[in-house]
Image: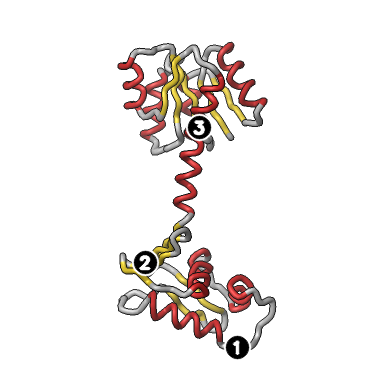
Amino acid sequence: MRLLLVEDDKVVSDFISTNFSEQGDDVTVVCSGKEGLSFAVSKPYDVLIVDRMLPEMEGLEVIREIRNAKLNTPILILSALADVEERVAGLEAGADDYLVKPFAFSELRARVNVLSRRVLNAKAVQEAELVVGNLQLNLVSRKALRAGTKIELQPREFRLLEFLMRHAGEVVTRTMLFEHVWGYYFDPRTNIIDVHVSRIRQKVDKNFDQQLIHTVRGAGYVIREPD
């Protein structure tokens, strides 16, 4: 896990970075608000840990600027300011969690893990669906939709469409389809691919003005968004 710690108290930053590093995490430590903002918007991190009271730029201002830059990296605030109003201000500025000092490292670790899992779960959901134009293929529910209309696919047709969509915009050869969809490492000299692609076309492109699946003569097939 890659962490950015923005904390000007060296005792606190050493304590946090040492404990995370001992557990195999990569921790970058900066001690001012401006430096924290610069690192946060220029490098990828899994979670940001930001103190409230920082030199050069206050913690809440750092967080607002990060969110204004359209970054959704999870942010946990560390602060000695414990009043409810202060915690609410931190969350409203764009933070995802708020931990009051002093704190136990085990609680900090648990909260960071929760924030990190949220990102992983969101990525997993996003990666579970392939989209080309108005065609959607959900790899979890095994459902296909075009413009909201359900498409019934046989298992082999689903795998064929999935492979085409994973390579959207690329020409997919017959050899690639035989290997990755049928598991053949030779050309059986049949028209099985043509038959299946024809069936999928009937289901995906029928009744739509814009065709998604195209034959590239002498090369293979491609699925791409309409021009």
Disc 3/disc 2 C-alpha distance (Å): 35 Å
Left or right of 150 in this view: 185: right
Location of mark 3 (residue) = 47
- Earlier in the chain: of badge 1 and badge 3, it is 3
Judge from the rendering whether residue 28 lies leftward or rightward of residue 85; answer left or right. Answer: right
Q: Earlier in the sequence, mark 3 or mark 2?
A: 3
User: Where on the picture, by quarter, is residue 14?
Assistant: top right
Q: Is residue 122 above or below residue 135?
A: above
- The local crowd at label 2, few if under 14, some if 14 to 19, many if 20 or more residues have their Cα within 10 Å, is some
The residue under label 2 is 145
Residue 165 location (% of width, % of height): 48, 66
In what element is the residue under mark 1? loop
Q: Position of residue 172 (x, y in %)?
A: 56, 73
Amino acid of disc 2: Leu
| Residue 222 in the figure: left or right of residue 134 | right
Which mark identifies residue 190?
1
Estimate the spatial distance between the alpha carbons at disc 1 and disc 3, rounded to whole Å: 53 Å
**On-image quarter of the N terminus:** top right
Q: Foreground mark, 3 or 2? A: 2
In this view, the residue in front, 54 or 165, is 165
Numbered disc 2: secondary structure: strand
Q: Image quadrant for the C terminus?
A: bottom left
Q: Secondary structure beneath disc 3?
A: strand
* Percent coordinates x, y for residue 194 in the rendering: 52, 84
- 193 above or below 212? below
- Give the residue displayed 56% in from the left and 19% down from the top: 105
**Which residue occupies the extreme right position in the image?**
185
At label 3, counting other C-alpha atoms closer than 10 Å, the crowd grade (few under 14, some 14-19, many 20 or more) is many
Up-down relation of residue 100 to residue 62 (above or below): above
